[in-house]
Amino acid sequence: MKKTTVFVLFSLLSLLLGCASTNVASMPEWVLNYQKEFPGSTYIAQKGTGKTADNAKSEATASLSYYFDTTVNANRESNYRSFETTENGKYSTKSERETKRETKVTTDTALRAVEYTEPWYSKKDKTWHCVAYLVRETAWKNFEPSVRLAKDNFTGYYNKAMEEKEPFERLRLLGIARTKGSDFMDAISYAQFLSEPLTNTNFQADILLLSELSSRQQEEKGKIPIFLEVENDSASRMYGTFAKAFAECGFKVTKERNESVYTAKAKVESEQVVQDELIIATPSVRLSLVGKNGSVYSYAKSGNRVKAYTQSLLEKKSLESLCPVVEQTFFEDFNAVLSGRK
């Protein structure tokens, strides 16, 4: 009887140990250390957990998406600074909202190719585990056509600019190339995140061309000095305002007409009404940039209504009203034309 009891206990103990051994053996290695199973050099992976298999899968996907967004945005910030330059502290970059929207679109596209481990259930903590992952090389090859399309858009406008003979139009085409270059840099940032070696191997020359674009624009601007003349400008105040604005845009204003490629012709005007000897006027300014083939750019703004009892005081107040408007708007307006946004 004792032997029988001992045998039964031994059998039960062996069965329990066997079950425990089976449970441990069935646990995938990635549950404890998914980075080891999915090394960063080959994969992009994130782990998720949940009360159900679908919950774990969804959390893994969300974690992977968040990792994409934060990392790619960081790459973009770094890459933008490598080819964006300031002109008197003024940047021309994409808004944070626009960048986030584009990142989401790109991430959503990439996540269509995501793969998952078979969800595993831990009886001990009653939790499902799952890893969402991408194979870097495969993901890069899937994304490469998007990079090439962005590159072709950039280089297409750049090459057109280099073939253009009219200086202002060449600058405008370079400006469009810079805008397209921003899209190309977005694609490069993403591609480098997937595989920096493959990206640099296939697009190094184009990345270098983009990095030199700002210098090329400044070089072209240096070739076309501007002669500035302003009518009805007491004390040359409007002249100084426009001269400063052109300098902020990267252009040289020369006082010698024969040295210039373009003439910026500006005129200060006002619509006047006299009431009981009080002169009331709405001042305005017009500017036209003229080359040998005619006008290539025009600008017009109005200031706030002014009042005075003498023409000399009215002119002074008109300029006081107009100059701040020019300071606030000319840079953006002129650069909008140079970048092809207007």
Image (spheres, helix red, strand yellow):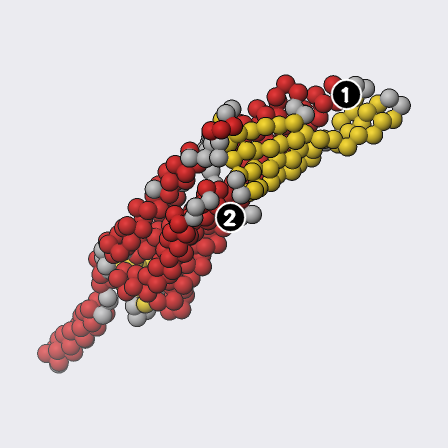
Mark 1 surroundings: few (<14), some (14-19) or many (≥20) residues within 10 A = few
277 vs 172, left or right, is right
207 vs 280, left or right, is left
Q: Which residue is mark 2?
A: 340
Mark 2 or 1 closer to N-term? 1
198 vs 212, left or right, is left
Helix, strand, or loop for circle 2? Answer: loop
Q: Residue at x 60, y 33 (%)?
A: 265
| Residue 40 visible | no
- Check the image and report above or below for 49 versus 239: below
Which percent across, then down, holds residue 319?
67, 25
- The mark closer to the camera, 2 or 1, is 1
Which percent across, then down, holds residue 76?
38, 47
In the picture as drawn, the residue positioned furthest to the left comes out as 3
Q: Quadrant of residue 106?
A: bottom left
Q: Residue at x 54, y 36 (%)?
A: 331
Q: Which residue is mark 1?
A: 311
Q: Quadrant of residue 18?
A: bottom left
Callout 1 amino acid: Gln
